[in-house]
Image: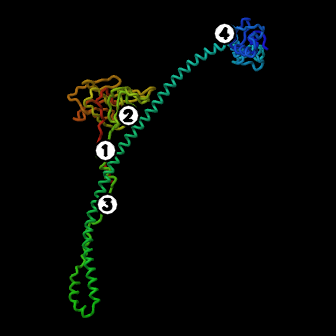
């Protein structure tokens, strides 16, 4: 049996720690369940220790020994805590110290041993408190990193979703364009087969007429042959009696007209098959237009809407939720999808009723968080005022007699000229002279209006050279 305090906390009936102890008038305490069982098994209600009788006592009305119950509960908690506290594997003592040099818990015997001689040891509770504070600060840094990771995750996830939307939209437009080509080819095939079948029907009709005539002649000849052969089988007198009529019938039989086949009686295969793909292609070009520049939606600012055919740009009613990408410009700018480094180039833009637009060319540098325009040569219109501007600040006000509806941009890189014209009346508006060689020059457009700016298409011309 345990000694000391633990012995005083044991019930004298079950010899275990008190559970819900009650106190008798004789001042002895027992577990309520133990005393109830004791009194049930014995004839009289007496104290199991001092044998004093308590005949009028009721187990349900006996007072609880609250002090003893609290002591027992505290003892059990401490005992359980001591039971879970790890011991030193070398000395089986409680680990009350922490060696800062070896960064491990030790007991008091370990502290005095050679293994930890001259090492700094601190009490377990103090060290745990200090390390918890240190780790709490580390957790704070980790939470900040987690927040950054969450933002990066959202950014890349949004980029993936946007790519999915782009792929679906592009696939839809590609299928739409190919459907137009398929429909054109199907119509051409249908028309050409109809012409072939018409020629076939006409020429076979003429042949059928000739065949019918010959067939009738054949039938008449066949009947004459059969009748003549039958009369030849008659007796001599009867045969000779009808001989004159038979000869006359044979002579009346029409001769076969050996009409020669006329030229062009056969299907003109060469006409139907000669350069078929080229002829269809030449016809197809009349239904196709060519855009000298195509807008790049990946460069369009979040306030702009680029049309499905990538030729028109306008301001939307609200800012679009677009992923961050290195090519993206500010809210109201967009570039062409291809740059120019040499040669001459020309394109026309329909501006019409747009009250705030800019056209020109620009050079680009990619920076973290988005693209940056390093140089711009542009013709701008804003609220009735036309200006020729560069990013360096050079600005010239233009006085125009007529408001242009279409602007033609001419770029001559080797000649170092960028010119703007009123495309409808071929009037020169302004020209920039600069060293354009050595730069990637992007077509540049800017607008703050819902009225669209539209790149006008060019007709497709095909030149066949004979060698």
Count every numbered label the image shows and give the total: 4
Image quadrant occupied by the N terminus = top right
Report crowding for label 1: few under 14, some 14 to 19, many 20 or more residues within 10 A (C-alpha): few
User: Residue 441: x and y, percent?
Assistant: 37, 33
Image quadrant occupied by the C terminus = bottom left
Mark 2–mark 4 distance (CA, rounded to whole Å): 91 Å
Q: Is residue 392 above or below residue 279?
A: above
**Earlier sequence position, callout 3 versus callout 2:** 3
Q: In this rendering, which labeled residue sits more in front, label 1 or label 4?
A: 4
Residue 177's image quarter? top left
**Earlier sequence position, callout 2 versus callout 4:** 4
User: Residue 449: x and y, percent?
Assistant: 30, 27
Q: Residue at x 61, y 15 (%)?
A: 134
Q: Is residue 319 above or below residue 344?
A: above
Q: Are marks 2 and 4 in contact (CB under 8 Å)?
A: no
Q: Which mark is residue 296?
A: 2
Q: Which mark is residue 438?
A: none
**Earlier sequence position, callout 1 versus callout 2:** 1
Q: Is residue 269 above or below residue 426?
A: below
Label 1, on which residue?
288
Drawn side of residue 179 relative to residue 161, left or right: left
**Earlier sequence position, callout 3 versus callout 1:** 3
Mark 3–mark 2 distance (CA, rounded to whole Å): 46 Å
Report crowding for label 2: few under 14, some 14 to 19, many 20 or more residues within 10 A (C-alpha): some
Drawn side of residue 432 relative to residue 400, left or right: right
Label 3, on which residue?
270
Q: Is residue 289 visible?
A: yes
């Amino acid at each position: 049996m345990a000694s000391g305090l633990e012995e005083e906390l044991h019930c004298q009936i079950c010899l275990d720690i008190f559970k819900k102890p009650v106190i008798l008038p004789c001042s002895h305490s027992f577990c309520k369940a133990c005393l109830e069982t004791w009194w049930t098994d014995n004839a009289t209600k007496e104290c199991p220790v001092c044998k004093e009788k308590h005949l009028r006592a009721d187990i349900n009305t006996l007072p609880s020994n609250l002090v003893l119950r609290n002591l027992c509960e505290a003892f059990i908690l401490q005992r359980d805590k001591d039971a879970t506290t790890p011991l030193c594997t070398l000395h089986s003592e409680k680990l009350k110290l922490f060696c800062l040099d070896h960064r491990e818990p030790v007991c008091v015997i370990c502290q005095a041993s050679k293994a930890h001689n001259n090492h700094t040891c601190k009490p377990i509770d103090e060290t745990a408190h200090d390390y918890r504070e240190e780790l709490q600060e580390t957790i704070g840094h980790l939470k900040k990193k987690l927040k950054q990771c969450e933002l990066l995750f959202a950014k890349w996830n949004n980029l993936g979703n946007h790519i999915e939307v782009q792929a679906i939209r592009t696939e839809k437009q590609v299928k739409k364009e190919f459907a137009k080509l398929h429909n054109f080819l199907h119509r051409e095939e249908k028309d050409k087969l109809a012409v072939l079948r018409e020629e076939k029907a006409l020429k076979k009709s003429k042949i059928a007429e000739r065949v019918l005539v010959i067939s009738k002649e054949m039938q008449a000849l066949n009947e004459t042959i059969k009748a003549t052969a039958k009369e030849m089988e008659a007796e001599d007198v009867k045969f000779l009696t009808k001989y004159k009529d038979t000869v006359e019938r044979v002579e009346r039989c029409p001769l076969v007209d050996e009409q020669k086949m006329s030229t062009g009686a056969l299907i003109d295969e060469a006409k139907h098959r000669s350069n078929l793909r080229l002829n269809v292609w030449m016809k197809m070009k009349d239904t196709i237009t060519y855009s000298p520049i195509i807008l790049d939606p990946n460069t369009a600012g979040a306030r702009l809407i680029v049309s499905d055919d990538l030729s028109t740009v306008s301001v939307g009613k609200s800012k679009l939720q677009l992923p961050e990408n290195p090519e993206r410009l500010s809210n109201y700018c967009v570039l062409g999808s291809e740059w120019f480094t040499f040669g001459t180039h020309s394109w026309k833009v329909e501006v019409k009723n747009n009250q705030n637009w800019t056209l020109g060319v620009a050079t680009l540098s990619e920076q973290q968080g988005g693209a940056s325009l390093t140089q711009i040569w542009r013709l701008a219109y804003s609220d009735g005022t036309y200006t020729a501007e560069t990013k360096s600040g050079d600005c010239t006000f233009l006085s125009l007699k007529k408001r242009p509806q279409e602007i033609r941009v001419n770029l001559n890189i080797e000649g170092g000229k960028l010119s703007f014209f009123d495309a409808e009346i071929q009037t020169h508006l302004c020209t920039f002279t600069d060293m354009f060689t050595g730069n990637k020059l992007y077509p540049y457009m800017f607008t703050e209006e819902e009225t669209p700016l539209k790149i006008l298409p060019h007709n497709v011309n095909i030149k066949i050279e004979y060698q």
